[in-house]
Amino acid sequence: TLSSIQSHQSILSAVGFRHKRHQLLSHTSTRTYYKFPVQTDFVGRWTTNNTLQSWINERIQLFQPAAVHLCDGSQEENQSLIFKQMQQGTLIKLNPQLRPDSYLARSTKSDTARVEDATFVCAGSKSLVGPTNNWEDPEKMHLKMDKLFAGSMRGRTMYVVPFAMGPQNSPFTMYGVQVTDSPYVVSSMRIMTRMGLNVLEELSSDESANWVPCVHSVGAPLPTASDSPDSPWPCNATDKYIVHFPEERRIWSYGSGYGGNAILGKKCLALRLGSFIAHDEGWLAEHMLIIGVTNPQGEKKYFLGCFPSACGKTNLAMLEASLCTMENSDKWKVECLGDDIAWIRKAADGKLYAVNPENGFFGVAPGTSYESNKNAMTMIEKNTIFTNVAVTDKGDVWWEGMSKDPPSEGMIAWNRHEHGPWSTSPAAHPNARFCVGIHQCPVLDAEFSNPDGVPISGILFGGRRSTTVPLTYECFNWNHGVFTGSTMSSETTAAAAGLRGVLRLDPFAMRPFCGYNMSDYFRHWLSFGEDKSTKDQLPKMFMVNWFRKDKGRILWPGFSENLRVIKWIFDRCDKKEGDVSNAIETPVGYIPNYRDPKAFDTSNLFDSFSHMDATVMDRIFDIDAKQFQKDLSMFGEFYKSFEDTQKIPSKLWEEMNQVKQRLDAHVQSTSK
């Protein structure tokens, strides 16, 4: 065997992981894979952390790479890796006059999105992860991973990537070390995280900081005796596993080279593992954007936005206020701290403070344009890695929604097919992405690197709902807000493999990312409202829905016009609980008094958009009680799905019953 149980346990103890089970590693005694002979003195010269040295050496022996690259995060290293990927065909250099220092990667058809059916959370028992996660016994999964990873990097280089999530010198910061055989992943990690020798110095000794071991392989070893060409996008078409061992603080990913499946600091560490750790330590790791909003009087408030992937998070995070047709919109300012993940802690003053642990954006390209998101388009004009978009004959990128009409010159689609008027499939994959550093954001908030985070005034929930949900409403109180977040639903998008347009419950937009039982997750959220002495310091909660339709057409003009909704929410955050000024109480929450332009600003709205008028506003804010009653039935079935593991908190059932009673009363009053 590679090593004894005792050596593994001493390593984990030195790293500082808190184990809740006594026999998590007992399977190691049955390992029978080949011990790969390798000289690893260079690892000792790279880091003085003995635990890290031992772990790297063991990875080398198990994975059996042809070479090992210990990353330093330098620009010279990055350029070398970019050049290597160009030689291998993984990256195409775009026209430097049109898109400086930017590149295009194109994956295989089988590797284009998150693979939720192959994502596992392997805690000590199935009840700990609940019905929303795939579970396997940790011991069995360890054996499976050992078997898959043995020799998985033959013929390839193993890269060792030290990285940090969160600001430097912050109580929020978490560290990881990822090994991978994908240079594309290394280049992406350099953008999305703090990565390199500076981070390595923060892990200089066994006592310096805890760190999460992350292992990744594309699962495509190269036979030494074969002269067959390698794939430009190596992956395993049949075996994909994204596995989390939350009690051990470990991540294993096999078979995919794409996005959150392979860039392990993102969804895997920052959300799935992060949420588990946050529950243990009393904070929150959430799938949320963070924005700062300043009104014309100079008052600034920070907001979180909770949206499933591909539901407008990035557009809202980079909203260009001056493009809104509302009067004095140019005097409003919206600044971005992040578009995807927020780590949130409650401070001594009772307020919630949030940081963005990421260092870049991994945004959905289709639908992004200068009209919909001017700031994002400005941000990706240079120094960007694009994945699965089309490339024009001029050497620039294109995707559906980037312009009204496709370029007049020819294009090669994401699948390497020629694309033209005859084509029946999209030029860009619906989940095509751009990966770009956060400091290229033209509206980056000055507090982005604040180690203590920013104080949160409001939390926005949202999703794609073509019916039922009005443009916006405010939750009555904290518990009602948690109920609203726990029953968020959205029509599915291309961000995950599977059918699109299907209505799915996605609580807090965390269904694919919560690393433990969501019943406990909801209970954890409720706990933040238990201290009545600080309840007024908690953020208000709101639901928004930009996507309501009538006869197939989205009614609200959206994009920069969403500033009107933000303005109303901004003002509502100053109201005491129960204050209905500038609002109308409904069975589901407070909606704006939208017929009063002083309460909800509609200045220039009807003149700027020919389809908008007072009757359309009525439809946008309509509360159809019978449709909401159908939703409640779906919510109840979802809650009942937890009964075999850990029951949903009684407070949420009480909130649901109160909503039902209000809806029943509304139906009775309107039927008379």
Image (tube, grey):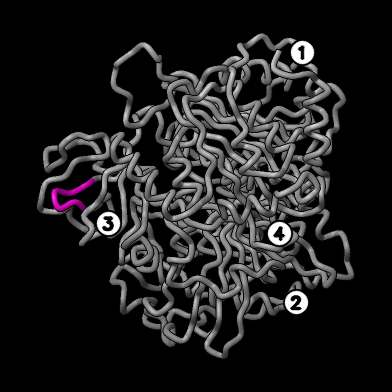
Magenta stretch contains residue 508? no
The residue wearing badge 4 is 344
The residue wearing badge 3 is 402
**In the rendering, at what x and y percent does residue 241 appear?**
55, 25
Residue 352 vs residue 240: left or right?
A: right
Which badge, 4 or 2, comes first in the chain's sequence? Answer: 4
Q: Are marks 4 and 3 in contact (CB under 8 Å)?
A: no
Question: Which label number is shown at residue 576?
Answer: 2
**Mark closer to the observer (2, 1):** 1
Q: For the residues marked 3 and 2, what is the alpha-carbon distance in whole angstroms?
A: 43 Å
Which badge, 3 or 2, comes first in the chain's sequence? Answer: 3
Q: For the residues marked 2 and 1, what is the alpha-carbon distance in whole angstroms?
A: 61 Å
Residue 228 lies in quadrant? top left
**In the rendering, at what x and y percent does residue 523 appear?**
80, 47
| Label 4 Cα crowd, 10 Å radius (few <14 / some 14-19 / many 20+) | many
Q: For the residues marked 3 and 1, what is the alpha-carbon distance in whole angstroms?
A: 55 Å
Give the extent of the magenta segment: 391-395
**Mark closer to the observer (3, 2):** 3
**Mark closer to the observer (3, 1):** 1
Which badge, 3 or 1, comes first in the chain's sequence? Answer: 1
| Label 3 Cα crowd, 10 Å radius (few <14 / some 14-19 / many 20+) | some
**Mark closer to the observer (4, 1):** 1
